[in-house]
Image (cartoon, grey):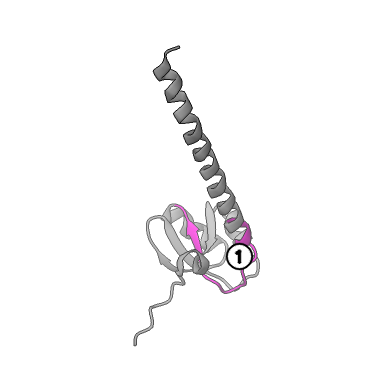
């Protein structure tokens, strides 16, 4: 084995460890955010992540209201206590609390 090959492998090991650590942190954060979404109070805005048609179909099956929609993020609301569970059962790919995720609540901005 040449010296340059050994040196390259030694440089890649710390980068590989960093990549694994970052991946684990991101995966853990996402799991926590998804788990906390199940505890949201009824009437909060939820972001349904996935193709627009699939998200709207899931919201309709779960008896929710579409507030706004784009290609891969649809904001919805329902007063049902188990709305998140019903969305996943209806085929939603990922559901997040929209108000915590980025301040999206589906309401028109206040004018001064």
Residue 27 screen position, x and y as percent: 56, 47
Residue 108 higher or lower than 48, as above or below: below
In the rendered image, residue 97, in percent from the top left (x then y), is placed at 54, 65
Q: Which region of the structure is painted magenta? A: 34-50
- Residue 36 shown in magenta: yes
Find residue 53 and report its image quarter. bottom left
Can the viewer see residue 53? yes
Q: Horizontally, is 86 left or right of 4 in the view?
A: right
Q: Residue at x 57, y 74 (%)?
A: 43
Image point 42% across, 13% down: which residue? 2
The residue positioned 56% from the left and 48% from the top of the image is: 25
The residue most toward the front is: 3
Q: Is residue 65 visible?
A: no
Q: Quadrant of the N terminus?
A: top left
Q: Residue furthest bottom?
A: 112
In this orientation, which residue lies closer to the viewer: 9 or 72? 9
Between 59 and 106, the residue placed more toward the observer is 106
* Residue placed under numbered mark 1 in the picture: 83
Compared with 70, 17 (above or below) is above
* Quadrant of the image occupied by residue 111: bottom left
Q: Residue at x 61, y 72 (%)?
A: 42
Q: Residue furthest left?
A: 112
Is the C terminus in the top left, top right, bottom left or bottom right quadrant? bottom left
Residue 56: in magenta span: no
Q: Secondary structure at mark 1?
A: helix
Near mark 1 (Cα within 10 A), the count class, few <14, some 14-19 or many ≥20, is many
Q: Residue 96 at x, y = what percent? A: 53, 60
Taking the view exactly as shown, the residue that stands out farthest to the top is 1
Total marks in image: 1
Up-down: is 41 above or below 4? Answer: below
């Amino acid at each position: 084995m040449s010296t340059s090959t050994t040196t390259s492998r030694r440089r890649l090991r710390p980068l590989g460890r960093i990549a694994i650590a970052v991946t684990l942190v991101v995966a853990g954060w996402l799991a926590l955010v998804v788990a906390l979404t199940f505890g949201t109070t009824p009437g909060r805005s939820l972001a349904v992540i996935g193709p627009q048609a699939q998200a709207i179909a899931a919201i309709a099956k779960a008896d929710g209201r579409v507030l706004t929609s784009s290609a891969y993020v649809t904001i919805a609301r329902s007063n049902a206590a188990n709305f998140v569970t019903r969305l996943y059962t209806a085929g939603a790919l990922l559901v997040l609390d929209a108000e915590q995720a980025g301040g999206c609540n589906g309401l028109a901005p206040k004018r001064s």
